[in-house]
C-alpha cells in the first residue's frame, strides 16, 4: 500500500515538474513559439489552395511558392492602399491626442475637486499614497530604459517575422513528409489515432483562420461604409483596422472603438451626439459579428465552451501578451482535438468542449 502511495506521489510530482518546465519554456521562448504557431496557422490556411494547384499538374514546390508570394502580395497591396491614409492619420494624431488630453484634464479637475471635498473627512494618510524612493522614481521616469526595452522587442519581432514566409513555404512543401513521419512515430493502432488527430487539428485551424478572415473582411467593409456615412476621415484605413480589431476575443469591442473614437474627438469635438452614434454603431457591428456571424462561421468548427475560452484567453494573454489573446483560441482548440482522438484524454476533451 505504501509502495502504491509513493508511486502515486512520484507521478504527481513528475507531472508538476514537467508542467513547470513546459510553462517556463513557453515563457522564455515565447517569440519563437509564436512565430512557429503563426506559420502553422498560415500554412494550414493556404494548403487547400496548394492542393488545388497540384491537382492541376503544378509541382507542389511551385504551388507553395505561388501561394506564399500571393500572401506577401496581398500584404503589400494592403500596405500600399492604406499607406497614404495611415500617414495622414499619424500626422493628425497629435491633434486628436491634444483634444483627448483636454477632455481628460476636465475629468481630472472634477476628480480633484471631489477629492478636496473629501479631504476634510479623510486623513491625509488616507488620501496620499506613499512616496517612491528616489531610485524607483528615477527608474519609472527613465524614458531611455523604456525605449531600450521597446526597441529590443521590436527588433526581435521583426527578425522572427522575417522567418514566417520561409516557414510557411517549408511547411507546405514538406507537409507529406512531416505528416508521414509524425504518424510513423506512433506504433501499431496508435498510427490511426495519430493520423485522425492531425486531420482534426488541420481542419480546425483552417476553419478557424478562414472563418476569422471572412468575418474580418465583412466587418471591415461594413465599418468603412459606416464611417463614410458618418463623414469620418480616413474611413478606408479605419474600417479594416476597427473591423479586424473587433475579432480580438473579449477586448475586441474596446480595441475596435479606439481608432474611430480618437478621430471622432476632433471631427465631432462640439457634438457629443455624433460621438454617441459613432460608438453605438461600432458596438452594434461587433455584437452582430459576435452573436450572428461568429457562431455560424467559426463556432461550429471550434466547439469550446465559454468558460474554457475565457480561461485560455486569460492564461495565454498573461503568458504572451497581445499575441496570446489572438492565439489562445486556436491553441486551445488544437488541444481539444488532440484530447478528442486519444482515449485516455477524452474526458478532458469533453471538459473543454461545448
Image (spheres, grey):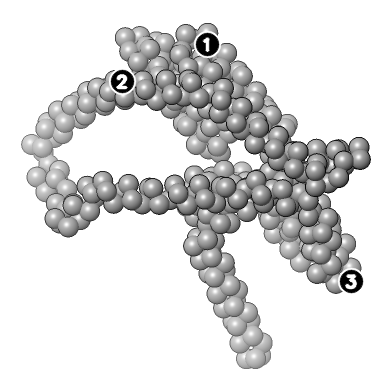
Q: Which residue is mark 3?
A: 188
x, y (%) of residue 306?
61, 43
Q: Earlier in the sequence, mark 3 or mark 1?
A: 3
Q: Residue at x 18, y 26 (%)?
A: 109
x, y (%) of residue 156?
47, 52
Q: Earlier in the sequence, mark 1 or mark 2?
A: 2
Which mark, by number, is residue 95? 2
x, y (%) of residue 107?
24, 26
x, y (%) of residue 91?
37, 22
Q: Residue at x 39, y 25 (%)?
A: 90
Which mark, by number, is residue 228? 1
Q: Residue at x 65, y 23 (%)?
A: 218
Q: Residue at x 86, y 38 (%)?
A: 52
The reply to whether the C-beta atoms of the residues labelled 3 and 2 are less than 8 Å apart is no
Q: Secondary structure at mark 3?
A: loop
**Mark pair 1, 2: CA separation:** 21 Å
Name above or below for residue 320 compared with residue 55: below
171 displayed left or right of 79 = right
Amino acid at each position: 500500500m505504501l509502495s502504491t502511495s509513493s508511486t502515486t506521489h512520484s507521478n504527481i510530482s513528475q507531472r508538476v515538474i514537467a508542467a513547470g518546465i513546459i510553462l517556463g519554456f513557453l515563457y522564455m521562448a515565447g517569440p519563437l513559439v509564436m512565430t512557429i504557431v503563426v506559420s502553422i496557422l498560415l500554412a494550414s490556411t493556404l494548403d487547400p489552395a496548394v492542393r488545388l494547384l497540384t491537382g492541376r499538374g503544378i509541382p507542389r514546390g511551385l504551388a507553395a511558392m505561388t501561394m506564399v508570394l500571393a500572401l506577401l502580395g496581398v500584404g503589400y497591396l494592403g500596405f500600399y492602399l492604406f499607406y497614404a491614409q495611415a500617414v495622414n492619420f499619424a500626422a493628425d494624431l497629435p491633434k486628436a491626442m491634444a483634444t483627448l488630453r483636454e477632455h481628460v484634464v476636465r475629468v481630472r479637475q472634477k476628480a480633484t475637486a471631489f477629492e478636496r471635498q473629501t479631504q476634510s473627512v479623510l486623513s491625509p494618510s488616507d488620501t496620499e499614497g506613499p512616496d517612491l524612493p528616489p531610485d524607483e522614481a528615477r527608474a519609472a521616469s527613465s524614458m531611455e530604459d523604456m525605449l531600450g526595452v521597446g526597441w529590443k522587442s521590436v527588433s526581435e519581432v521583426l527578425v522572427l517575422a522575417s522567418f514566417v514566409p520561409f516557414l510557411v513555404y517549408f511547411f507546405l512543401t514538406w507537409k507529406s513528409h512531416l505528416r508521414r513521419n509524425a504518424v510513423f512515430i506512433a506504433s501499431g493502432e496508435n498510427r490511426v489515432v495519430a493520423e485522425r488527430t492531425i486531420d482534426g487539428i488541420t481542419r480546425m485551424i483552417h476553419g478557424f483562420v478562414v472563418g476569422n478572415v471572412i468575418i474580418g473582411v465583412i466587418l471591415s467593409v461594413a465599418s468603412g461604409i459606416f464611417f463614410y456615412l458618418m463623414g469620418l476621415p480616413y474611413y478606408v484605413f479605419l474600417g479594416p483596422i476597427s473591423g479586424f480589431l473587433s475579432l480580438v476575443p473579449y477586448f475586441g469591442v474596446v480595441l475596435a472603438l479606439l481608432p474611430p473614437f480618437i478621430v471622432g474627438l476632433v471631427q465631432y469635438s462640439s457634438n457629443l451626439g455624433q460621438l454617441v452614434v459613432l460608438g453605438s454603431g461600432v458596438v452594434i457591428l461587433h455584437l452582430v459579428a459576435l452573436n450572428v456571424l461568429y457562431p455560424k462561421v467559426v463556432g461550429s468548427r471550434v466547439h469550446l465552451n465559454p468558460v474554457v475560452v475565457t480561461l485560455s484567453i486569460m492564461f495565454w494573454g498573461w503568458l504572451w501578451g497581445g499575441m496570446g489573446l489572438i492565439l489562445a483560441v486556436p491553441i486551445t482548440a488544437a488541444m481539444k482535438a488532440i484530447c478528442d482522438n486519444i482515449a485516455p484524454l477524452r474526458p478532458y476533451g469533453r471538459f473543454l468542449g461545448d
